[in-house]
Image: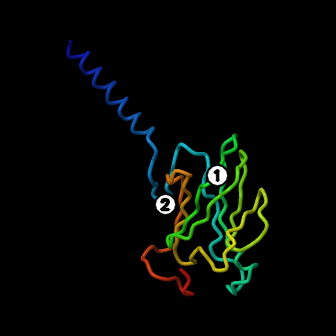
Amino acid sequence: MSRTTRRLTATALTAGALLTAAALPASADDHGRALSRYSPVVVGHVQYDSPGRDDRSNRSLNGEWVTVTNTGRNSVNLRNWTLTDESRHTYRFDLRLPGRSTVRVHTGTGRDTSRDVYQDRRTYVWNNDQDTVTLRDAHGRTIDSTSWGHHHGGRDHDGRH
């Protein structure tokens, strides 16, 4: 094999290795968001501090929510997918999310619809100062996550976990 052929072969193999590495799923980006390239479902907006006084009323609890969005064209069965926080509070889905649609997951109680579902909790879940929302599929694989605040542990300013 000539020197030129060896160089071209080495260049082609290197380029192929770089393309393969780029195609692998990323585990996290620089902003605390875990990414999974095999799913079009993502964590959208997080309203971790319900508007008004935190008086644990159902209205206040439902003012705390997370959206989950299917960015793809096809529906995705979210049955047994979970949303968790750093304290391991877990919400388990039982729905099919149509393509290009969003569901809002409220903390309090209510009647589930195609656009809003409820965790049926009587206490807050998402910490105001710092927390992480993690979305996992039915096999426990992390699909997406997002974090906020200063991650230094402990309780937030109003004592919630």
Q: Residue 108: horizontal and vertical position, in percent?
A: 70, 74
Badge 2 amino acid: His
Mark 2 packing: few (<14 Cα in 10 Å), some, or many (20+)? Answer: few
Q: How many marks?
A: 2
Q: Residue 17: horizontal and vertical position, in percent?
A: 35, 32
Q: Is 137 displayed left or right of 103 in the figure?
A: left
Q: Is 94 displayed left or right of 18 in the figure?
A: right
Which disc number belongs to residue 78?
A: 1
Mark 1 vs mark 2, CA separation in Å: 25 Å
Where's the N terminus, which quadrant? Answer: top left
Q: Residue at x 25, y 21 (%)?
A: 7
Mark 1 packing: few (<14 Cα in 10 Å), some, or many (20+)? Answer: some
* Residue under label 2: 31
Residue 160 lies, with reference to residue 76, above or below; the image says below
Q: Residue at x 60, y 74 (%)?
A: 125
1 or 2: mark nearer the eye? 1
Q: Residue at x 51, y 69 (%)?
A: 88
Q: Residue at x 69, y 72 (%)?
A: 120
Give residue 30's quadrant in the image. bottom left
Q: Residue 34: horizontal and vertical position, in percent?
A: 49, 55
Badge 1 amino acid: Leu
Give residue 54's quadrant in the image. bottom right
Q: Residue 137: horizontal and vertical position, in percent?
A: 56, 52
Give residue 20's quadrant in the image. top left
Of 74 and 79, nearer the camera is 79
Residue 16 lies, with reference to residue 76, above or below; the image says above
Q: Is 160 displayed left or right of 3 in the figure?
A: right
